[in-house]
Image (cartoon, rainbow, N blue to C red):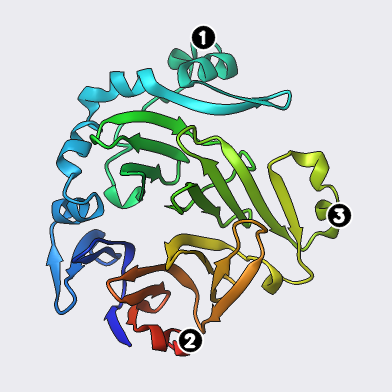
Amino acid sequence: MKKLHLNGHSLTQNENTLSFASFSEKEDKTYYYQYNGENLKEISRELYANSKFDNRWGSISRQLEESNFLYIESIAKCWVNEAGKRKLISLSDYYNHTFGENWENNYDFSIIPNNIFSDVTNLMTCTIRNETICLLWPHNILLHFNEHDELVQYIVLETSDYYDTLYQICSDGQGVWAVSPTLNSVVKYRFPSFEIEKIYHYTTDEELARKTEDIRNELQVIYCDHALEGLDYPEYISYVNGKLSICDMENKRIVIFNPSSGKIESYIALNSKPFEFLKYKNQFVIQTDTGIYLLNENEINDFFD
């Protein structure tokens, strides 16, 4: 086991490197680092972003500049559920319906807020069928770039609750999965429509679990006698070794998640809270509240930080 850094987050890896950000509260500044399998060095924000987007950040970032906001507004949509029927409508139509046709004059916000794309660490990325998907945290906004790196969709995702915030996404090659810590939920979105396919919500409230069929077709409420039977603040989801892995933060473990049933197949118990879990080359990477660690496969079950 190797402790790579004391304070890091927003891990991203490609074939050769592992990169992450580290925020200094004392200096009120974000630093960026990169590990090549041997050495750790400080890097620029630009290099970190290129690592996150496989050296395509230049073409992608240009499409997120303010000069392109009119185009983004023209494709901006959101999923709504009206009388049990789900449909995709433009954001401008949604705001007109919700706040009135003069909402731009009456409210201090716009369809594409200024500086919304300024923090690259808030872009959670995954790849499906050679296309790049980004979740913009904490806005539940999904950006879809096609195989030519062209921005083709900007969608405000539907979640299980208005106050729900998605924290991380990954792909199993079939759809896009996300986790919501605040509502103890795991969500699967269809590709490329990004309509909700299913939601697993974990609760110790037996009455809520009994009313599953009354809530919505896609929502499966899983009753747990205690928190360890389900998830308690799922912080991160990743597709590792052909399986979905979730950082079950408050339960201090990393679980293997069954996408068909929502059940926990197995887990790795930890002594601290996990925030991120992925694989870099032949090693596992765990970020906990004590740092970032590299582990070989035979060390994962004996991890102690």
**Side of 57 relative to 78 (left or right):** left
- Where residue 220 appears, x then y in whole percent? 72, 50
Q: State the mark number for residue 101.
A: 1
**Side of 201 relative to 213 (left or right):** left
**Side of 206 relative to 159 (left or right):** right
How far apart marks 3 and 1 lie (CA) works out to 41 Å
How far apart marks 2 and 1 lie (CA) works out to 57 Å
Foreground: disc 2 or disc 1: 2
Instruction: Work out whether mark 2 precedes mark 1 in sequence or the reverse, and give the earlier one.
Output: 1
Inspect the image, locate mark 2, and give the three-letter code of the amino acid beneath it.
Asn
Helix, strand or loop under label 1: loop
Helix, strand or loop under label 3: helix
Give the residue pinned by disc 2. 301
- Where residue 15 appears, x then y in whole percent? 22, 63
Q: Residue at x 65, y 27 (%)?
A: 81
Foreground: disc 3 or disc 1: 3
How far apart marks 3 and 2 lie (CA) works out to 36 Å
Quadrant of the image occupied by residue 196:
top right
**Side of 107 relative to 83 (left or right):** left
- Give the quadrant of the C terminus: bottom left
Q: State the mark number for residue 207.
A: 3
- Give the quadrant of the N terminus: bottom left
Instruction: Work out whether mark 3 precedes mark 1 in sequence or the reverse, and give the earlier one.
Output: 1
- Whether residue 295 is visible to the viewer of this picture, yes or no, is yes
